[in-house]
Image: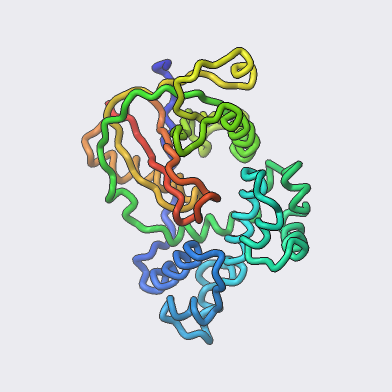
Amino acid sequence: MPSNQPHARPKAMPMTNRPQDPLLARFSRVIAHIDANPNNPLDLAELAGIAGYSPFHFHRQFAALFDITATRYVRLVRMRRAAHSLLFRKSTSITDIAFDAGFENAESFSRAFRKLHAQSPSDFRRHPDWDGWQTPYEKLKRVRRDTMPIDATSTITIIDFPETRTACMDHIGPPGRIGETIQRFIAWRKIHHLHPSKHATFNILWCNPEDTPPDAFRMGLAVATNQNLTDQDRETGLTRITLPAGRYAKLRHIGSDQTLGDSALALYRDWLPQSGETPGDFPLVFQRIAFYPDVAEHEAITDILLPLA
């Protein structure tokens, strides 16, 4: 790979209130419980008990801390998973997605989904608004950032990573439209029988979306394979990229992609300066271990891999 490739070093972000605040710590347990059980009945009395808070005042305190009601938070968690399933799990029926989101039938799900996205589930699946489809879920990102653990670097290890040949499809353009490229990448993998259970999945962060103009943003979607690429594959946008062997710092991120950038930032900000290590001559890599929405969001696993010199 060219030696002048920029490393995707996350942009520093202002620190928000964190769970060291006793009250916030209580309600962080509630957020973790909701994220771990989005499809189970979650009444306010149960959630108040997890916070160790009076049921009479729980909902007001939740809204005061997070600027969203607990009921609304639960609904957004369920609808976000439904939206992901509509986009990236085309074989799952809308009825099954509706049941999984806690609705009694597809009709009630469709009404709620249309109210949130201004599209029916079927229209959203066929013609999503790539530029704006994640906008309804920005509040989830802010809440999770406020409640994620402070010490995200305690489990960093140094590993020897083997040279890995991949087929890579680059997404170039606004980060919000990456789902469009993911759909094409998934379709190509299915045709070539490159199932994630047998062929590792990687993202290559050629640049940082925080300080890169949207039209210049580039991220590689890669799958480990020794298959030769055909001319048709190259016309589809596939290239051969080899992840270099060597020492890598590995931070395991468990949970939502919405806070993945914060974990990557912690790797650079908190661990790297005191480690005595120097980044190597290759970008940051995410290895996808367990995929949302195939698993619950709190069970999604991504290994953040930083090449070292």
Left or right of 138 on screen, residue 20: left
Work out which quarter of the rendered image holds the C terminus and state it. top left
Give the residue at x 43% y 76%.
50
Residue 28 seen: yes
Q: Nearer the viewer, residue 57 or 178?
A: 178
Residue 172 seen: no
Residue farthest left in this picture = 276
Q: Nearer the viewer, residue 285 or 234?
A: 234
In the image, residue 105 lies at what x, y percent?
73, 65
Left or right of 278 on screen, residue 221: right
- 151 vs 220: above or below: below
Give the residue at x 42% y 47%.
301
In the image, residue 180 lies at what x, y percent?
65, 36
- 9 vs 50: above or below: above
Give the residue at x 65% y 56%.
97
In the image, residue 15 lies at what x, y percent?
41, 54
In the image, residue 308 lies at what x, y percent?
29, 29
